[in-house]
Image (cartoon, grey):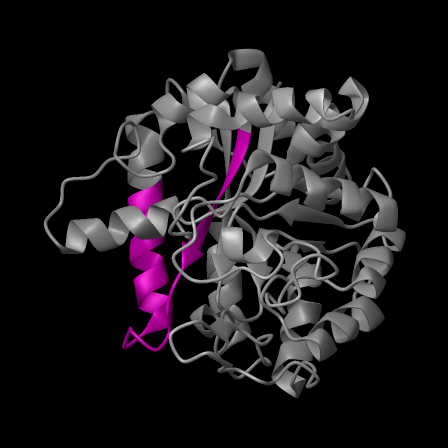
Amino acid sequence: MKVFDMHCDTISAIYEKRKSKDAVELRKNNLHLDIEKMRKGDYGLQTFALFVDKEAQKDSFCTAQEMAALFQEEIKKNSQDIAQVFTYKDIEENEKNGKISALLSLEEGAIYQREPQMLRKFYEQGVRMATFTWNYENDLGYPNRFYNPLEQKMWSAGETAGLKEKGLEMLEEMEALGIIPDVSHLSDGGFYDVAKYAKRPFLASHSNARGIAPNAARNLTDDMIRILAEKGGVMGLNFCVSFVRENWKPKEDGALLSELIRQIKYIICVGGEECIGLGSDFDGIEEAPSEMKNAAGLPLLAEAMEREGMLYSQVEKVFFKNVKRFLKENL
């Protein structure tokens, strides 16, 4: 069963480890995802996010440029197994050649918020998806509420505020360039602004259903899922236990496969079979699903979905067909 995953933080994780003098590579490592694990998991496409914590960096743009250079270096070193994609035709070409497709995305609008030329620079480097925020307010808009288990409170409360004027300008610039807007991490108000003003379908690369896991307020409400589906969008199932499990508490084990499947079935009931794909958030989450461990374990999820009564055709849609269709129409 092919895997098309819309989000991982592996490049950012490698970047941070190398800053600590840890010689980590994309081919084989002790992270959730590497090329050897992807081969075992039968990956067709992986979206690699350039994730920057803007509060921890002096210059988010420069940091993301360094990550982009690392990405290019690793793709070049492993060109026999993986190749970057810029258009849908590149995905088809990689399939013919037996290579994994690597799609580049941005996570945190502070990376490009200063001027449109920054976004254009990333487009030239192959970025084809971008979020507006991470967990902090920036010049583009506001994040959704995020539960801080250490302080037992919501520490970001911009959920009703929408995109700022600059955020609306960048949405227009994204669509002009051909960068797909990603509403994961964006406030509720920001979601509705994207839904109102976007001229093309958009996506939520790594967001689940708030109807099951309400503590994770950046999950989508039923209304958001329906709107996303109606507009031809797709959302990626996030494997993080705090976004999966109802009434999650700190220090609990990773999500169970049955809990992931509950999310999938719920989203299908709300938005239909065409709107749900995978957005693992590997290497951006502390605990991978306890029965899956890492990217090599994706076939276990497919098997469990069939055991729990899902049709093979439904499993295909979740694992790759929905994301593949979306990219064919929008990449």
**Pick the front one: 198 or 222:** 222
Q: Position of residue 107 (x, y in %)?
A: 49, 61
Residue drawn 48% across and 78% down? 136
**Pick the front one: 116 or 222:** 222
Residue lying furthest left = 21
Q: Is residue 289 above or below residue 188?
A: above
Q: Is residue 17 above or below residue 141?
A: above
Q: Position of residue 128 (x, y in %)?
A: 58, 50
**Quadrant of residue 277 within the rendered picture:** top right
Is residue 206 visible to the viewer in this orientation of the structure? Answer: no
**Pick the front one: 89 or 64:** 64
Q: Is residue 67 above or below residue 72?
A: below
Q: Is residue 69 magenta?
A: yes
Q: Is residue 116 above or below residue 94?
A: below
Q: Position of residue 202 (x, y in %)?
A: 73, 56
Q: Position of residue 59 (x, y in %)?
A: 31, 74
Residue drawn 35% across and 46% down? 11
Indicate left or right for 204 with 56 as reference.
Answer: right
Residue range of the region highlighted in magenta in the rendering? 45-71
Q: Is residue 219 magenta?
A: no
